[in-house]
Image: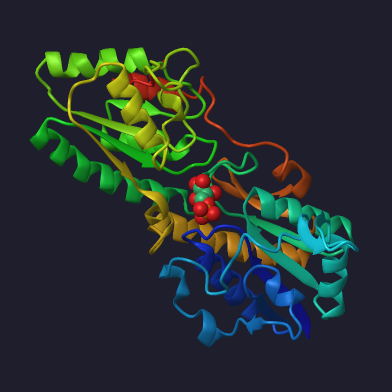
Amino acid sequence: MKKLLVVTGGGDCPGLNAVIRGIAKRAKKENDWEVYGSKEGFVGVWSEPTELLKLTKSKTAGIHVKGGTILKTTNRADPLHYPVKDEHGNIVIVDKTKELAERIKALGFDALINIGGDGSQKISKALFDHGLPVIGVPKTIDNDLSATDMTFGFQTAVQIATESFDRLVTTAESHSRVMIMEVMGRDAGWIALHTAIAGGAEICLIPEIPYDVKKLVKRINARYDNGRGFVNVVIAEGAKAQEGSIVARAGDEGSRHVRLGGVAYQLSQQLKDAGVTADIRETVLGHTQRGGTPVAFDRVLASVFGVKAFEMVLNGDFGQMVAFKNNDFVSVPLEEATRDYNKVGESNYLIQAAKGLGVSFGD
Ligand code: F6P
């Protein structure tokens, strides 16, 4: 029997379980493979005794509809940046990927499928370079990996954000308020941009386009002046104001330093300081965007990634990551997969289209 190890690392994401099930189901069609999952990222293989879950039919049946990961995951124990004590008792960060690759081989595994985002795929690359046969599967709600046109979890996050946005529109209208909704996305504005188009936002603020507070004030006041009387804003967690566009308040260093809980609150304060008198409310969606069942598209993407990843193991296509490109499922070298972030380019047609729909980016 050959043995395959499956790991889910980094933040959780709707669709992880669908990948796990895809791998397990496809492997079952071969008679000579056993599939194991490591609990909590690589913690399961580091532990003594190991904490491994045999991915049998009964453990994986029907899990594609469930959010999270049955294997659990963690941001701790990153083997590329592993905290250990030096001889003086100080914590130092070391690269343990060589040791980890040897440990996995010593446990009798013939291959590893590592499901994770940018950080996880850097680990995949390091383990592969240390001689472990590895396949990567991309995962992130942020959709910020350049080697794949789409990551699973992204469509679910956009769906959840859009549903929340729709609810905020009716309450904004009833109270003639400015509603600011903050979404995730790390340094990329994909979730915000898609939500703004799907929901019909007046304003969309993303990290790729620093906003001018004064332009936002103009846009908001115009909405009140022309009788619409309410404004819905989507702001990505990484969005920033243009230097010099923030109104400093007497006695402090300016509202860019006011940080009550996220950029939604920061923006709210910046708008008030710059003269918006309408009532403003803030909503931070946070981890709701990563929870619960994946939408159908993400189930499909994740399930096919699982099947494809196992077939890459069978074909010996190691050192590669499965990807969705030009409506096809392909493999890309891990090196390429970890090279660039996929951010929303200013020339991206979605930006132009959103502007055509009347969305302001505050630029
Ligand atoms: O990368 C996915 C993501 O959800 C980002 O959108 C967000 O910035 C981050 O992870 C939150 O991480 P944590 O779950 O560690 O708070």
Q: Nearer the viewer, residue 130 or 212?
A: 212
Q: Give percent across and percent down for residue 355.
A: 35, 19
The number of discs equals 0
Is residue 327 at all visible to an observer of this figure?
Answer: yes
Residue at 12 percent across and 30 percent down: it is 176
| 181 lies above or below 286 | above
The quarter in which the C terminus is drawn is top left
Q: Nearer the viewer, residue 167 or 145?
A: 167
Q: Give percent across and percent down for residue 136.
A: 69, 57
Picture quadrant of residue 206: top left
Residue at 19 percent across and 38 percent down: it is 169
The quarter in which the N terminus is drawn is bottom right
Q: Give percent across and percent down for residue 189.
A: 47, 34
Residue at 82 percent across and 67 percent down: it is 100
Q: Nearer the viewer, residue 140 or 1?
A: 140
Q: Give percent across and percent down for residue 39.
A: 63, 75
Classify residue 274 as left or right of residue 257: left
